[in-house]
Amino acid sequence: MRIKDKTMISRALPMPHQKNNKFYTDVSPMIMNWHQTLSAAIDFLFENNNRVPQETLPVIQTDLSRFASGEKQGFNTTWLGHSSLMINMDRFKILLDPVFEPKLSMVGPKRFNGPLPLVIEALPPIDLVIISHDHYDHLNKFSIQAIQEKTGLFMVPLGVEKHLSAWGMPPPKDRLPQLVGVP
């Protein structure tokens, strides 16, 4: 399949918990008192808790030739670090939460596995990029701008299109694009 027009999808079908473009849930949020909040913050900021690997994680350069193959019945995936995943399904290329910077914020952690497992410029054309949410480690301005010209469609949750529009993406449309079969 290929996506016929270049756009961004952010509109959800009406759902029982949706009202005025917001989602409501019947699940109560976790509520912490001041002492619990302070204790959790101190633990997160100052305790080790084995959140960082003791050894350098191995990095294997990604073989992108599998994503350029003409195999119609093929399915393969490649993990690109943290939340980023490349999927090739019958020549339809899907990229999930692309983050291609070694360090995403001045105070946040850097990539545990060092350099990127691929060269961004070597990425094949991408049919669909799916952004799960707008946390810094799942939505990255540099990465979105680097793959914008290679991407047929961005699918994002409600509200996230504001970020992409501010970064130069075309505005979203309130319809799904027409999907057509690959010749």
Image: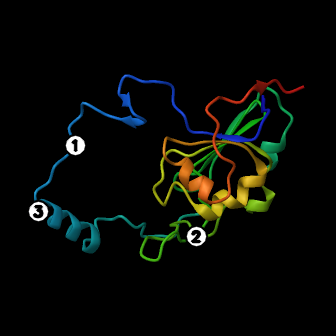
Q: Which mark is residue 102?
A: 2
CA distance separating discs 3 and 1: 16 Å
Quadrant where the C terminus lies? top right
> On the picture, is 158 further left or further right than 150?
left
- Residue at 84 percent across and 39 percent down: it is 69
Q: Which residue lies furthest to the right in this view?
A: 183
CA distance separating discs 2 and 1: 33 Å
Mark 2: amino acid: Pro
> On the picture, is 66 further left or further right than 104?
right
Task: Choose between 93 and 50: the one closer to the eye.
Answer: 93
Q: Residue 34 carries which label?
A: 3
Q: Is the residue 4 above or below the residue 14 in the image?
A: below
Q: Where's residue 142, x and y in %?
A: 63, 65
Mark 1: amino acid: Pro
> On the picture, is 90 further left or further right than 28?
right
Precedes in sequence: disc 3 or disc 1: 1
